[in-house]
Image: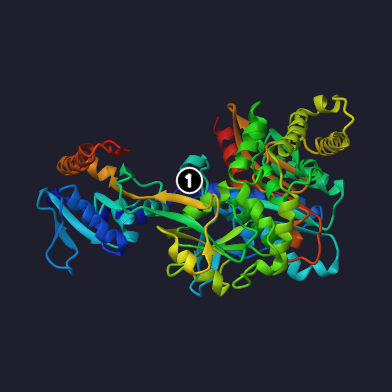
């Protein structure tokens, strides 16, 4: 079987990250061309040797980990949440200046005694003293759990939800939520507030790569280097610089 | 590697942290667990066998924190969140609360079986499944039951053929007393207990810990924090209180106002705790010969002297007792003695198990009242691996 030499780049096909990723690619001079909106494979006319795959954001990390794609653009929060620690992937370029959002705790407005993360720690104890466990709805259980534990909150149960989280406290299904927000408007409209120290992670888009795949195929590696050079060149030209996390 | 090959490798490889036992190891394990079980039976411990999965909430309620983050959890087909057991105590207490608490008798249970704890590579723990064997006494608050648990731990280790062992002893009860004297909130006590290592690590430990507590708002609350303390009941929006009650919110608001804790006051509490931790660190001889007028220090010195004296000679093993109150295991539910058993090989400590007293747990898991309890568990696989390595030398 002949060796695959095309670099496979996977980008989001859904949500706000779809449009902003296409805009980003256009800005750096690497416009993505799709034959039709229903076609999930595309190309970059300005960079030969690259196949672009469009996938749900939630599947990008696993696809790069499995080696089905070599590099991927996605929100760093998604990568940190879903990555498997024993697999050879890394963030190559961080903070790509788009897709900015925060994973933030949302607390019922009615909990007027809660204004900081320390208050949440006390409320968790209050629940425990009543024989209950404070329930936290989230789509990002790993990041949320690490954050709560590192902030002295020891007693809680995470409820993994995939739909609208903001309704969960009002329905009595969970007590608080940890959700992605960019402006906080949806939380406010659903009677939830943010609190001092309640931001779990500030995230923006990043480029991840499968380091094993790239280092074992010289053609892919060279194309990846060219791709990265184009992006870093764009930022250097604008004097904003770029955060290179992993040198290939 | 293409994805087809990777799939093949994944399905034919053992998972990280899991071990296939050889027939010899399997038989050695059966023999050792049967022998330990016989000892426990002689001391009156009934066999307790329980499901390997329980509701995730049971473990979250019991251990919280560090252990919860290592659970193997999944949603069963019916939609309930369940976890593979990371230990047995939760199940023992669950059974006790449902079936035995009503009889108000002292209950003794022993158990053995596999437990599962995830660990990532940087935690330095290799086994994600291992066999745990241990026992619990529920309903006895006496020092005699602490001594019995320590004795049985040593007997279990000796049964494996170990020649020497290190026991690290601490006592969460005395540490809690010091913090409670300063009227710290339960959240601040929990935070302090989880970070005792920071306190004892270096000279700036007190300042470091006070800074950490301040950064997350546990002490010296800011203006925003104070404002909420002045809210009157009628001003609180009553919509969607969730599972909290209005009176809890108002009560907490008022308590925040009267209990705002300054960095200075917290540092004072940490200073007293730090003196206790440095006093109760090392071998018993130095501790016993340290003159003190502090009643907590006196009680603690007497307590450690009794448990060490009465349990130390139960086996022929060389037992090195080290009192180290700062070395706790991240579980804030312990209320009294807490101990870790270790085997030191080439200056490296291999954990063998541990135990302690947890008087508040029965009530927290739904029991009718606070019922004292204590217990221990050993890692049978660790014991066997040490013995096997010794035999191969």
Name the chain letter of the residue that bears numbered label 1: B
Q: Nearer the viewer, residue B261 or B333?
A: B261
Residue B225: x and y in percent read 63, 51
Residue B97: x and y in percent read 75, 67
Q: Residues within 10 Å of mark 1 (few under 14, many from 20)?
A: some
Residue at (44, 48) in percent of width and height? B16
What is the quadrant of the C terminus of chain B in the image?
Answer: top right
Q: Nearer the viewer, residue B234 or A167?
A: B234
Residue B183: x and y in percent read 78, 46
- Is residue B333 visible to us here? no
* Residue highlighted by disc 1: B120
Q: Nearer the viewer, residue A244 or B127?
A: A244
Residue A239 lies, with reference to residue A200, above or below; the image says above
Residue at (59, 52) in percent of width and height? A116
Residue A154 lies, with reference to residue B290, above or below; the image says below
Does residue A67 appear to the left or right of A83 in the view shown? left
Q: Nearer the viewer, residue A92 or B32?
A: A92
Instruction: Describe the element under mark 1 as helix, strand or loop.
Output: loop
Residue B312: x and y in percent read 80, 35
Residue at (86, 46) in percent of width and height? B143
Does residue B158 appear to the left or right of B72 in the view shown? right
Which of the colour schemes (rainbow, by chain, secondary structure, one colour) is used? rainbow
Does residue A33 appear to the left or right of B45 in the view shown? left
Residue B153 lies, with reference to residue A9, above or below; the image says above
Does residue B218 appear to the left or right of B146 in the view shown? left
- Is residue B210 visible to us here? yes
């Amino acid at each position: 079987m002949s060796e695959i030499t095309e670099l496979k780049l996977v980008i989001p096909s859904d949500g706000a990250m779809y449009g902003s990723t296409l805009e980003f690619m256009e800005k750096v001079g690497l416009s993505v061309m799709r034959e039709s909106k229903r076609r999930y494979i595309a190309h970059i006319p300005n960079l030969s040797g690259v196949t672009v795959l469009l996938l749900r954001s939630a599947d990008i990390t696993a696809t790069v980990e499995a080696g089905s794609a070599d590099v991927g653009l996605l929100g760093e929060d998604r990568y940190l949440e879903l990555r498997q620690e024993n697999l050879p992937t890394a963030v190559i370029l961080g903070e790509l200046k788009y897709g900015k959002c925060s994973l933030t705790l949302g607390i019922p407005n009615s909990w007027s005694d809660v204004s900081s993360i320390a208050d949440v720690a006390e409320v968790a104890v209050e629940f425990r003293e009543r024989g209950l466990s404070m329930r936290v709805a989230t789509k990002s259980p790993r990041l949320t759990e690490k954050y709560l534990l590192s902030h002295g909150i020891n007693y809680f149960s995470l409820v993994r939800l995939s739909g609208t989280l903001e309704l969960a406290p009002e329905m009595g299904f969970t007590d608080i939520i940890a959700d992605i927000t960019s402006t906080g408007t949806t939380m406010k409209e659903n009677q939830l507030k943010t609190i001092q120290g309640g931001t779990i992670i500030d995230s923006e888009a990043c480029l991840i790569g499968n380091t094993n795949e790239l280092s074992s195929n010289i053609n892919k590696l060279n194309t990846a280097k060219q791709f990265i050079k184009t992006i870093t060149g764009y930022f250097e030209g604008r004097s904003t610089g770029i955060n290179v996390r992993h040198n290939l | 590697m293409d994805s087809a090959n990777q799939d093949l490798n994944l399905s034919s490889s053992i998972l990280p942290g899991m071990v296939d036992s050889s027939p010899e190891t399997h038989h050695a394990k059966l023999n050792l667990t049967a022998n330990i079980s016989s000892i426990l039976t002689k001391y009156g411990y009934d066999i307790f066998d329980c499901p390997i999965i329980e509701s995730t909430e049971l473990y979250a309620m019991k251990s919280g924190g560090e252990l919860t983050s290592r659970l193997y959890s999944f949603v069963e087909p019916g939609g309930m969140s369940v976890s593979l057991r990371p230990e047995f105590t939760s199940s023992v207490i669950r059974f006790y609360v449902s079936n035995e608490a009503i009889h108000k008798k002292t209950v003794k249970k022993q158990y053995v079986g596999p437990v599962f704890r995830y660990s990532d590579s940087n935690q330095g723990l290799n086994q994600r499944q291992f066999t745990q064997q241990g026992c619990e006494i529920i309903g006895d608050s006496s020092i005699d039951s602490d001594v019995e648990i320590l004795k049985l731990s040593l007997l279990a280790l000796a049964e494996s053929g170990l020649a020497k062992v290190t026991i690290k002893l601490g006592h969460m009860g005395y540490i809690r007393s010091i913090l409670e004297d300063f009227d710290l909130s339960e959240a601040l006590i929990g935070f302090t207990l989880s970070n005792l290592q920071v306190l004892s690590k270096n000279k700036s430990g007190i300042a470091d810990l006070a800074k950490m507590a301040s950064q997350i708002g546990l002490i010296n609350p800011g203006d925003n924090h104070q404002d909420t303390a002045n809210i009157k009941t009628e001003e609180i929006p009553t919509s969607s209180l969730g599972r909290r009650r209005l009176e809890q919110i108002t009560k907490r608001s008022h308590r925040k106002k009267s209990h705002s804790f300054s960095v200075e006051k917290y540092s004072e509490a940490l200073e007293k705790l730090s003196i206790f931790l440095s006093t109760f660190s090392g071998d018993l001889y130095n501790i016993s010969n340290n003159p003190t007028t502090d009643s907590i220090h006196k009680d603690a010195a007497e307590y450690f002297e009794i448990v060490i004296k009465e349990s130390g000679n139960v086996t022929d093993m060389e037992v090195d007792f080290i009192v180290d109150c700062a070395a706790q295991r991240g579980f804030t539910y312990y209320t009294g003695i807490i101990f870790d058993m270790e085997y030191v090989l080439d200056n490296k400590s291999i954990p063998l198990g541990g135990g302690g007293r947890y008087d508040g747990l029965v009530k927290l898991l739904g029991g009718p009242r606070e019922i004292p309890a204590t217990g221990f568990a050993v890692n049978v696989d660790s014991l066997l691996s040490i013995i096997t390595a010794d035999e191969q030398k």
